[in-house]
Image (cartoon, rainbow, N blue to C red):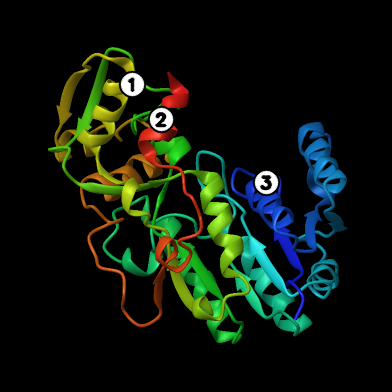
Amino acid sequence: MGMSKVLVVGGTGFVGRRVVRASLAVGHPTYVLQRPEIGLDIEKLQMLLSFKKEGAHLVEGSFSDFQSLVRAVKLVDVVICTMSGAHIRSHNILLQLKLVEAIKEAGNIKRFLPSEFGLDPARMGHAIEPGRVTFDDKMVVRKAIQDAKIPFTYVCGFAFAGYFGGNLAQLGTVLPPKEKVLIYGDGNTKVTIVDEDDIATYTIKTIDDLRTLNKTLYIRPPENVVTHKELVEMWENVMGRKLQQITISKQDFLASMKGMDYAGQVRVAHFYQVFYEGDLTNFEIGEEGEEEASKLYPDVKYTRLDEYIKIYA
């Protein structure tokens, strides 16, 4: 059997661009949905054209034109959707329901990877408002996938290094602090923080692997499971000096949502789940229907967090 043909939906986004390049890097025939809604966004267009130069096929399709989605899906074996579920960017999770319908009608897809790439929504029934909307919407999509009997893999169980690592998980910035740092709670909750390029590599690894068919793939590389205090210490070691650490209690952290816009409140709620509830790591992986990426693919030389953070110095 040859390598699966892959369609990436959301290929110019934060995760999507990496998935496209990871797919091309290992030789999958790679298709990227080009939506007419791109309008005057020259940066997105130039990124799409750069994919084309690297060997990707651009396929026109729109969520407002159902048959165009069906035609795009019929070209491939695997569909990976990387549309944003983050309110600070854009929240498009439920748009995937149209993609699910197109996959169902096309009838040829051997695997669909919906936009997950974060906390496992199946474990987030206890999540607080307003952050739980992300998980509720993802579960709606999961139900549609399973009702349509579409083969799937869900990739989740980590935080993005770009948003949680280099900035020491400080809200409102993507750069590391130089003088003082907020510590969430006692700072001893374990979190999993993964380089986005590695997330893409593991995602592509899974699409032709029968071991992950109709399962959840968690990405929890052991060297990247750290406490908040350990993360801060990594940066202090890079700088060669200590930061002033300011502890913020659960109550004060939640109170900080007051006065924020909706997107800001959602982000605070997600940080609460990660750093106060420990929802990335407060369970063992290994139940039926679960796999862990670094164990399945030990050949992937993932970026260790202590190495990742050095680039910020």
Left or right: 113 in relation to 189: right
Residue at 41%, 26% (x, y): give it. Answer: 172
Q: Which residue is mark 2?
A: 309
Q: SS class of the residue under badge 3?
A: helix
Please give the label number shown on residue 238: 1
Q: Which residue is mark 3?
A: 17
Q: SS class of the residue under badge 2?
A: helix
Q: SS class of the residue under badge 1?
A: helix
Left or right: 57 in relation to 184: right
Residue at 85%, 42% (x, y): give it. Answer: 49
Q: Are marks 3 and 2 in contact (CB under 8 Å)?
A: no
**The disc labelled 1 sits on which kind of residue?**
Val
Q: Mark 3 and mark 2: span between their CA atoms?
A: 22 Å
Which image quadrant is residue 174 in? top left
Q: Mark 1 and mark 2: span between their CA atoms?
A: 8 Å
**The disc labelled 3 sits on which kind of residue?**
Arg
Query: Could you say which is closer to the camera, residue 253 or residue 291?
Result: 291
